[in-house]
Amino acid sequence: MAEQILKDLTFFYPELALTATFLAAILADLIFKRTAIVVSTVVMAGFVVTGVMVLAQVNMHESIFGNMIAVDSFAYFFKLVIIISAILIVVFSLGSSELNTPRRRLGEYYSLLSALTLGMMLMAGASNLLMMYLSVELSSIASYILSGYTKDAPDSSEASLKYVIYGALSSGLMLYGISIVYGLTGSLDIYAINQTLAKGEINSIALLIAGVLTMAGFGYKISAVPFHFWTPDVYEGAPITITAFLSVASKAGAFAMMIRFFKVTFIDSSVVSLPAGVWATFQGFQWYHLIAVLSVLTMTLGNLVAIWQNNLKRLLAYSSIAHAGYMLMGVVVLSNEGLAAILVYFVVYLFMNLGAFYIVMLVANKTGSEDIEDYKGLGSRAPFIALALSVFLISLTGLPPTAGFIGKLYLFAALLNHGWVWLAVVGALNSVISLYYYVRIFRNMYLRSGEPQGEPISFGWVSSATVLVLLIPTILLGLYFTPLVQLAQASVRMFGIP
């Protein structure tokens, strides 16, 4: 057993690097008190090393620690999304005025950020129900603290408390669902559960109840309706850096875990009459109908409620809910094509959503406000920043020639190719609705003058360079996206095979 564990550890290097980063950040904070730059440098170095180790896992297909964690191309893709997001969030944090105040020690902030990243990475590869629950709890506990980190902000503590309450409820429901699955099948290993279900001796109603309860935990992490209630308040009250991180990386880890759970557990691999890359579910558990309903509710509520928001963080929170609904459409398809579309969408969503949140942070640093009304005249006062925000919002809408258009194009194509015409129509209508509330921001930036009129807002070259790093892929992936699509297709080709 010891020999096997040592062998498995060689495939666990990225997670070990993050664990070492967490410990090193704590030690650096104890030694170099009130010197945030030292701790941030340690964490940034740890994230870069982790990224290199993740890149070394390309084309691996292993199951380690007794099928607790899968090291495969699917997890590899999501780990890259998570670690790139984490690196960018460290950069964002260095320029955040709400974090870098004279009396605030940031050692705990950066160490918890590495713990949160570790939890998300474990979510991406978890292939055991117990491991899934533990990884959700690790990321949740770290995010509870980080969402209330700016205690001097009036809504910060409220955001953290609401997050804890909703998180505890969702985790309890998920754990109850897992216990039912264990009682029905006698196993927590999703591959072993699949083999038990293939024998057809399980009560389908009990299994359906277990699946719905487990979905509560996944839905909470991805902000799917009706598990989304925490999202607007937490996104508004948390530091913008944490809001941005939760909107991208947390969703990535949760989607990876949810897809692995449903794809491996409930797909009948004995059906060979279907075309290559198309799946069949076990009779009596057609969970994709449930996810189709969740997708419609999530994107519709997210877009409709966003229309009434004046706080940009809160608006982007509802926009994030809507985008979770779009990505759920890819799960409904039950094919490799749908999964590849989700992977493509996550990459473009990373750049365009983090870009939008970063500009909200930059403007808040200068104006002290996140209200849409304070964006009046930004087009003349800060032309480059206003142009970049416009591109990010156009991409979030899904209009060409931005990367967001390519993400939605592949999602809608997957739906139409598999007969889900009505769901594609609902998704297209929701994209039109989203254009309305994004146009409100364009109108204020370019068609309304602010006070004082004509006073320019200057941003440093570091901030402008960071915006450019996010802006270039948002445009480039809208024009040249073939390598990204090929990587996504390769990442799902062997997925689900033990």
Image (cartoon, rainbow, N blue to C red):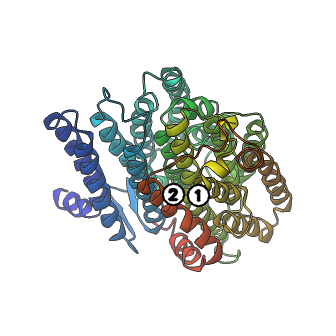
Question: Which element is circle 2 on?
Answer: helix
Counting from the top left corner in percent of width and height, residue 12 is at 29, 59
| Circle 2 or circle 1, nearest the eye | 1
Q: In this view, does 202 lie above or below 170?
A: below
* Identity of the residue drawn at 48% across and 21% down: 157
Circle 2/circle 1 CB separation < 8 Å: yes
Counting from the top left corner in percent of width and height, residue 24 is at 20, 45
Quadrant where the N terminus sits is bottom left
Q: Is residue 276 above or below residue 155?
A: below
Q: Is residue 338 above or below residue 109?
A: below
Counting from the top left corner in percent of width and height, residue 6 is at 19, 60
- Amino acid type, residue under disc 2 in the picture: Val
Tell me the crowding category of disc 1: few under 14, some 14 to 19, or many 20 or more residues within 10 angstroms, Cα based. some
Mark 2 or mark 1: name the one nearer the start of the chain: 1
Q: Which of 431 and 371 is in front in this view?
A: 371
**Is residue 126 visible in the rendered structure shown here?**
no
Question: Which element is circle 1 on?
Answer: helix
Tell me which corner region of the image, top left, top right, bottom left or bottom right, holds residue 220. top right
- Amino acid type, residue under disc 1 in the picture: Phe
The residue beneath circle 2 is 467
**Is residue 194 visible in the rendered structure shown here?**
yes
Report the disc number at residue 384: 1
Tell me which corner region of the image, top left, top right, bottom left or bottom right, holds residue 300. top right
* Identity of the residue drawn at 81% across and 56% down: 423
The answer to whether residue 446 is left or right of residue 249 is: right
The answer to whether residue 228 is left or right of residue 189 is: right
Counting from the top left corner in percent of width and height, residue 343 is at 57, 64
Q: Nearer the viewer, residue 209 or 147?
A: 147
